[in-house]
Amino acid sequence: MSVTRHYPARLTRQRLEPQGRIDRHDHDSHQLLCPASGVISVTTDAGTWIVPPLRAIWLPAYCPHAHTAHGAAELCSILLPADTSPLDPGQPTLLAVSPLLREVLLALTASVPPRDDERARLEAVVFDQLRPIPASDSYLLPEPGDSRLRAIARLLRADPGDSRTLADFAKAAGSSERTLSRLFRSNTGMSFPQWRSQLRLQVALIDLAAGTPVGTVAHRCGYSTPSAFIATFRQAFGITPGAYHRRHT
């Protein structure tokens, strides 16, 4: 992606304590938000993303959002005027963060800012490096709108290892498995097993970044064996849970 002009940006770096939260708000500017360390969850009307340091999130202007730190986190933020468009998506978008992009973001948001001419060159590198992740790989967890599905979602967030089937949940809710299955697809765009798998991976990212051992995370998230968890995690994120754990603790 090439950019031929310089977009004036506001640059900040902010620390959040464990479970520190910035309540729902929006900006009159686009925002690129990337954890320099730690893991954050970002919630918009579309659902919730988990954003570790190997990812960033693009939040278009006037998009309401909130975020929470899972463990101590340090956030790099770039705010761009709403009339600029270094990215096409007019919706929240998860981005890949290459080693180069990460180092440039750290340099731009350092306590001693770069000189104006250097800053312009570094910002141009940022815009050139923005790489949206395919929606299928973004691990967005959509929030279901139906009250029965929200009740199931609350139970699974409290215990992601809960192995009950959708038929079991349907029986407890006085509904049918077919009805709930149809509602999951229409509310979230996912099947129930896909939604639960997404939730478990999000919980795993948070727990690993908090220093929880891999075997404990695998058990808490309902995987039959640590090896099954390792295989699923690596397929999703391109890194083993052990390597991720060492990188972020």
Image: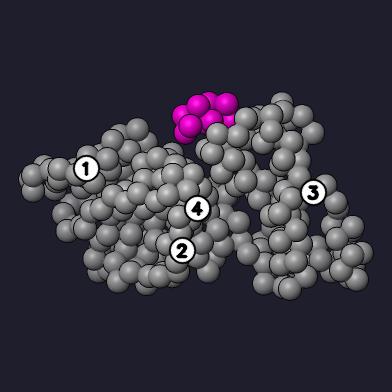
- The Cα–Cα distance between marks 1 and 2, rounded to whole angstroms, is 24 Å
Res 81 quadrant in image: bottom left
Is tag 1's residue or tag 4's residue first in the polypeptide sequence?
4
User: Magenta segment, principal secondary structure?
Assistant: helix
Residue closest to the eye, 4 or 78: 78
Label 1 crowd bin: few (<14), some (14–19), many (20+), radius 10 Å: some
**Mark 3 Cα shell of 10 Å, populated few (<14), some (14-19), many (≥20):** some
Which residue is label 2 attached to? 66
Is mark 4 in CB contact (under 8 Å) with mark 2?
A: no
Determine the residue positioned at 50% across, 53% down: 19
Q: Residue at x 76, y 41 (%)?
A: 222
Rendering coords of residue 123 (x, y %)? 21, 47
Based on the displayed image, in which of its 4 quarters is residue 73 positioned? top left
Nearer the N terminus, badge 4 or badge 2? 4
Amino acid type, label 3: Asp
Point out the stretch of residues depicted in magenta: 237-249
Q: Which residue is mark 1?
A: 110
* Residue at the disc numbered 3: 162
Residue carrying label 4: 19
Q: Is residue 198 above or below residue 106?
A: below
Q: Gap between marks 3 and 2, in whole Å?
A: 27 Å
- Where in the figure is residue 124, as x and y percent of width and height? 20, 46
> Where residue 150 sits in the image (x, y, percent)?
71, 67
